[in-house]
Each structure stands twice: as C-alpha cells, then as structure tokens.
Amino acid sequence: MKTCTLQILGEIIVVIYFILIFVFPRGPYRIGEWLTRSRLEKDPLAKQEIDKLKKAQQDLELGKIKALIASDPVGDDEEAPSIVLRDKLYRAIKYMIGRHDWFEEQRFRIFQIILSVATASLSILGWTVESASDGHKPPIGSYWPLLATAAFAFLAAIHRYNRELDADRPYRSTADIRFWFFRYNMRDSKTFSDKPKPDLDKAERVILERKAFVERTIGSFSIEGSLREDVEQLFILQLLERAKSESLTLLRWLMSYTLLALLLQTVFYIAALSGKNVQ
C-alpha cells in the first residue's frame, strides 16, 4: 500500500475520532442512561403494572418493619428490635459500599493490566523486528496472529469493563431510595444547565426543583419508611456487588488467556527472529 494511501486512512481515522469526542461525548447511543424508564414512558400500561408491584412490595416491607417496631419494649432501648435493625443496616451498608469499591478497584487494575500487556507485546515485537537484519525479516503478514490477539484483547477489555459501568439495571424501575441517589429526586438535568439564560429563570427553575425535592424526600418521612429505604438500599448494593463480581471474573479470565497467548506468541517470534539472525 502506498504511503499516501496510509496517510489518507490515518487522517480519516483522526477525523472520525474527533467527531466522536465532540459530537458524541457520552457515546453515540444512550449508554448509561436508564433505558428501562425510557421504554416505560412509551408503555403506560406496563408502567402502571410495575408501579403496582412496587407499591405492593413497599407496603409489605413497611408492614414487617411496623410490626418489628411495635414489638419494641421501650422506644429508646438500645436492645429494641428496631434499634438493632437500624444499627445492623448501617453497618451492613457501610460494608457493602466498601466491597463495591473493592470490586471496582480490582476491575480497573485488571483492565489496566490487559491493556498494558497487549501494548508491551506489540512494543517488544516491533523492537525485535526492527533489530533483525533486513535479509532475515519475515513478511509482515506472518505477525497477524499476535496482532489479532492484541487487538481482540484491547476491544474485549474495553467492552467488558464498560459494559458493567453502562448496564441498564432492571431494579431501577421499582427502586425508591430517595435519600441515597440523586436520580430518584433530580430527574431533569436541564434544571441545572449552564446554558445561557436569564438569571431569574435559572433561579425560578432551581426553586421549583428544590420544592419538589423537599416534597419527595421528607414530605412523607417516617421511621418505618426510613428503615424500609435502608433495607432496599442494602438489597441494591448486594445486587451491584454480584454484578461487579461477575464482571471481575470475566475480566480476570480474559487477562489470564491474554497473558498466556501473547507470552507464547511473543516468545515464538523472538526465537524465530533470533534463530534467523544466528544463521
């Protein structure tokens, strides 16, 4: 292939790269958004049925918690069931947040290792080929297995790492944890937009959202409701931990297979080139 053709292809790739960065800064698709909620907005009957399921489950949970509180011998007794439940929930939530962060840290480390190993193998191969004498350099086409392995490792690592971050969680359509996550209270991101508009209009929109926020968070606040929300939050954290664990397993095995394949291929090519140089 001619040099000018390679240059043209490189320029096309650069143009596409910058278009994606500036035109689709959050991706060409609605990855990471709450796709389930978007679909339900187009299907009111399904949304109504899900809301019924959510309300029924919340009432069931509240009933159990109310019964537990009603059995308290003394309201401020440290051994009262509701106090024990509250303290246990707080400790469990704190522990689960730590586990969630640990899994995410491990995922990121393995993701970096895969990219680093793939890059290092290509660098070693390039250096070895460059150091070989011109008369003994094999055709570039003979390197396609290593190049294909490295390219696949790059793409697979990026896909598996981002898929977990961008997953559309089914529980979101039934979740109601208003003290824990902003999306349950501030659904309209345009309210806090920095786009030019009159200052008074900005202030009025923020005040409207603030009133709705207060109404959603403390308008129907109760001890039972607070404990119920903590229980639901613990459930969601455990769901996320399981998802993170499964994602970590996929990345860990991808790393193992990639390390083995690239190591064997790199050693093979180095040995082949070294043997030719010795002859």
Image (cartoon, rainbow, N blue to C red):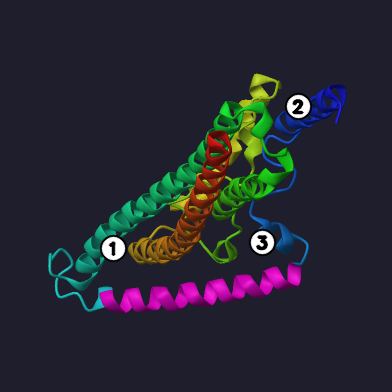
The answer to the question of whether label 1 and label 2 lie on touching residues, with beta carbons closer than 8 A, is no
Identify the secondary structure beneath mark 2. helix
Which residue is more in the foreground, 94 or 62? 94
Distance of label 1 from label 2 (alpha carbons): 51 Å
Q: Residue at x 46, y 75 (%)?
A: 59
Q: Quadrant of the C terminus?
A: top right
Q: Which residue is mark 2?
A: 14
Q: Quadrant of the N terminus?
A: top right
Q: Which one is in front in this view, the residue at disc 1 or the one at disc 3?
A: 3
Q: Is residue 154 left or right of residue 236?
A: right
Identify the secondary structure beneath mark 1. helix
Q: Residue at x 33, y 75 (%)?
A: 66
Which residue is more in the foreground, 233 or 118? 118
Which residue is more in the foreground, 145 or 35? 145
Q: Residues within 10 Å of mark 2 (few under 14, many from 20)?
A: few
Q: Position of residue 13 (x, y in %)?
A: 78, 31
Q: Position of residue 192 (x, y in %)?
A: 61, 32
- Disc sitting over residue 89 in the figure: 1
- Classify 269 as above or below 163: above
- The type of residue carrying mark 2 is Val
* Magenta run includes residue 54: yes
- The type of residue carrying mark 1 is Leu
- Classify 66 as above or below 207: below
Q: Which residue is mark 3?
A: 36
Chain-order first, disc 1 or disc 3: 3
Q: Is residue 21 left or right of residue 239?
A: right
Q: Position of residue 226 (x, y in %)?
A: 37, 60
Q: Which residues are magenta?
A: 44-68
* Magenta run includes residue 206: no
